[in-house]
Image (tube, rainbow, N blue to C red):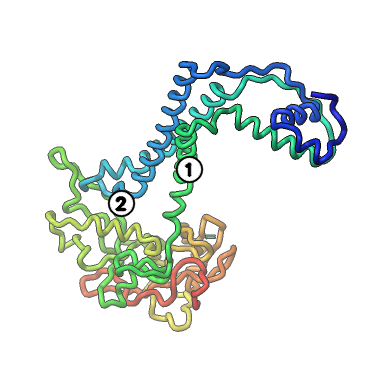
Amino acid sequence: MSEIKSSYSEEEIKRMSDDELARLGTEMDGVTVAYRKERFPVEGDPAEKRAARGIGFWWALSVIFGLAFIAVYLFWPWEYKHLAEDGLWLYTIYTPLLGVTSGLSIITLGIGAVQFSKKFIPEEIAVQKRHDGPSDEVDRRTMTALLNDAWKTSTLGRRKVLMGLGGAGVALAGVAIALPLGGIVKNPWKPRAMGIDGDGTLWTTGWTLVEKGEKVYLGRDTGAIAEEHHGHWSTQGVNRLIRVRPEDLDAGAMETVFPMTEDMVNDHDNFDPSRDVYEEQMHSIHGSRNAVMLIRLRHADALKAVQREGQEDFHYGDYYAYSKICTHIGCPTSLYEQQTNRILCPCHQSQFDALHWGKPVFGPAARALPELSINVDEDGFLYADKNFVEPVGPAFWERQS
Ligand code: FES
């Protein structure tokens, strides 16, 4: 090629082949190619075929793992199973399988890509001088030519199978990363059948069942798990939730309670060792808006308690029940300090006053903790005699209160 000029006319550029433009580009950029060697200069080299097969193997694996990830994500039984339930083993390997298949899909794609550049991209040593300033037309054109040259010499254009496998691997690895986001997208306004964890909308909880005419007790979490009998696990006769009586709490104590309908009760005088209510009780505990703090104020403090207008009869003597879901952004407000009667949310330090209908007195929460109206039945058990009068948890724009 002739001497490098500082600029070229449109005509001169048009007359040059891609090879000439590629060389011109490197030289105008002050790049000197000190060494360049094709990996397989002789066409039909058996080693080249072996290399292509090796890369194809890795990319085919990437496709297989990508498809396996999608299959696991869509069809594997993912719903929670407790210790005694059928399908527990399949459930426990659901998350590891997602990790293994997506990880292997990306790793095998990467191994194939590294192999491809080692086996097919020409070996080259190039040295470039740095220069400043924006690129002009000839630089842009020569850059394009260089990229074309890289594409041609990579041989990928004529390796349709490898290109298909590599492309599918990239697409499926992308899907493996993006697909789990799909599970997060759901319609928060679409109700399902009402159950012990609400109907799936933001304004219902298990306590809403009171409105449907059900008796809903305050259930304390025992932490019990399935029991082993003669080598197999069973939840028969195991109570995760039991009903609470006022005398179960000392003055100044707090207990987290969950809703329990009558068909979930299997405790005290009603205990039947052959009944299995464990699963339904776990659904109550898993209900994201179900947790309530039952507080027994010290009597001297209870005498100073101020009731919110319209909620004067929500408490039962010294017993008050407030939603445990923080009205800031929904953490559990777990810390009750009996000396000050304050309820503290550990997330952003909001504080609520248990003597003033759970109103916020410090921190970012702006609304009181909703109070649950409670009473004691003829058998001495605490139950909710009304649903919450406002939605629990943080703000959302349809919220009226
Ligand atoms: S979630 Fe309770 S203070 Fe922020």
- Camera-side residue: 214 or 371? 214
Density class for disc 1 (Cα within 10 Å; few <14, some 14-19, many ≥20) is few
The quadrant of the rendering that contains the N terminus is top right
Residue sitting at x 19%, y 60%: 267
Q: Secondary structure at mark 1?
A: helix
Frontmost residue, 340 versus 106: 106
According to the picture, the residue beneath numbered tag 1 turns out to be: 171
Up-down relation of residue 265 to residue 232 (above or below): below
Q: What is the crowding at mark 2: few (fewer than 14 residues within 10 Å), some, or many (at least 20)? A: few
| Disc number lying in front (1 or 2) | 1
Which residue is at 42% across, 81% downward?
A: 312
Q: Position of residue 285 (x, y in %)?
A: 33, 58
Name the residue carrying label 2: 79
Cβ–Cβ under 8 Å for marks 1 and 2: no
Q: Earlier in the sequence, mark 1 or mark 2?
A: 2
Could you tell me residue 299's position as x and y percent?
41, 69
In the figure, is residue 200 to the left or right of 163?
left
Q: Residue at x 13, y 54 (%)?
A: 273
Residue type indicated by callout 2: Glu
Q: Is residue 116 above or below residue 225?
A: above
Q: CA distance from mark 1 to mark 2?
A: 28 Å
Residue 12 visible at all: yes
Q: Which of the 4 image quarters holds residue 25?
A: top right
Classify residue 140 by image quadrant.
top right
Amino acid type at circle 1 is Ala
